[in-house]
Amino acid sequence: MDMNLEQLRAFVEVANVGNFTRAAEQLHLAQPSLSRQIGSLEQDLGAELFRRARGGSTLTTAGESLLPLARRMLADADSVRRELAELAGLERGRVRLGATPTLCISLVTEVLSAFHAAHPAIELHLSEQGSWRLLDELAAGELDLALITTSDAPASRFDVSPLLAEELVVISSGAADPLVAGDAIQLAEVARLPLIVFSSSYDVRIASDAAFRSAGLTPEVVLEGAEMDAVLRFVERGLGVAIVPATVLIDRPALRSVRLEEPTLTRTISVARPVGLAPTRAVQVMQRTIAATATAFAAQAGATMRLAEPAAA
C-alpha cells in the first residue's frame, strides 16, 4: 500500500459529509482532483470505499473499517506536526532577558544555566539594569522579559507576575569574631557598624537609604558605590557589613547573615513582559524555567524567602 495523508484526509472528509462535491469545497479542491485521490486510495487498498449514488456517497464495509484508522493516523500526524513545530521554535531564535544586578548573580545565574543546558541553540541576551531602566527597555521592545523588584510597574503597559518575596538581611564575614552576633539585628544597631553600601542605582541601596532616613539614622558608611560582587568580597574579608537580599547568600558559606528587624525590609521579585504581545515558544519556556528556579530558591532559603502571592486582580 502507498497511502498518503492527502488521500486519507480526502477520504475522511467525504465520509464526514457524504458527498464528493461538498467535501471538495471543504478541502478547497476541484472535485476531479478529489475523485482521483479517492480512486487512487481505493486502487492501493484493492477495495471500494464508497457506494456512489446521485443522492450522495455512503461507506462500504471496507470504508467503515478504514475510517477509525484514518482518523487516528491524521490525528497522530497533526500531533507530530505540532511537536516538530514547537521543537523548531526552540532550535532557533532568541530570548532577551533583563534583570537587576542582585538577581544576575543569584537567580538569573541558575535560570540561564538550566535553560541553556536544555536549549543550547537558543540565543540568549542579558541586560543588567535597575528595575525602572529594565521597564524602559521592555517598553521599547528591547527585551522579552524582565526580572524586577519594583511594585510600581504600570499595569496598562506590563504584565507583572510576582515570583518571590524575600527579606533584606545583614551579612558579615563568617570568620572568627564576626561584627554581628545573634540571629537578628535592629536597624539602629546596623547604623553603628562599618557599612558597605551599593551604587546609588541599586534597588537595595534605595530601599536601605529610605529605611535609615525614615528611622532618623545616619549609618557609618566605610565604602560606597560598590557593585554586588565587590560588596560580597569586601564583607568576606571583614571590611564591614552590608544589607543584601537573602537570594545572594545561597551557596556562599564564607558569609554569615542575620535577619533585620525593627523594621524588617522585604522586596518582591517579579517577572514582567509587555501587555498585548504574545510570547514566543522560547520565551514561554524561559518563563517556566524562571518559575521553577524561583520555587527551588524558596525551598533552599527557608524563612527569609517565600513564593510571592499572586497580584490582586
Image: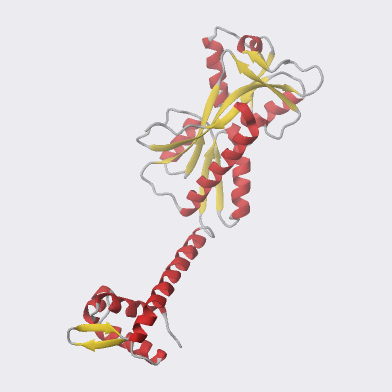
Asked whether residue 217 appears in the rendered view, the answer is yes
Please name whichever residue, 185 or 137, is drawn nearer the observer in this view of the structure. 185
Q: Where in the figure is residue 7, as x and y percent of width and height?
A: 37, 81
Closest to the observer, 116 or 309: 309
What residue is drawn where x is 74% and y is 15%? Answer: 179
292 relative to 78, above or below: above
Q: Residue at x 31, y 86 (%)?
A: 60
Where is residue 120? Give x, y as percent. Answer: 60, 55
Asked which quadrant contains residue 206, the reply is top right
Asked if one can make out residue 201 in the rendered structure from this viewpoint, the answer is: no
Viewed as shown, does residue 117 lie left or right of 69? right
Residue 223, quarter of picture: top right
Residue positioned most to the top: 216
The extreme left residue here reads 55
Q: Residue furthest right?
A: 176
Is residue 65 left or right of 243 when viewed as pictured? left
Q: Please, which residue is most extreme toward the front here?
A: 61
Task: Establish if 11 lies above or below 98.
Answer: below
Asked if residue 9 is positioned above or below residue 312 in the image, the reply reads: below
Residue 2 at x, y = what percent?
45, 87
Q: Position of residue 171 (x, y in %)?
A: 69, 22
Tally of numbered tags: 0
Q: How is colour applied across the structure in the image?
A: secondary structure
Q: Is residue 149 left or right of residue 58?
A: right
Side of 76 relative to 264 (left or right)? left
**In the rendered view of the protein, which quadrant contains the C terminus?**
top left
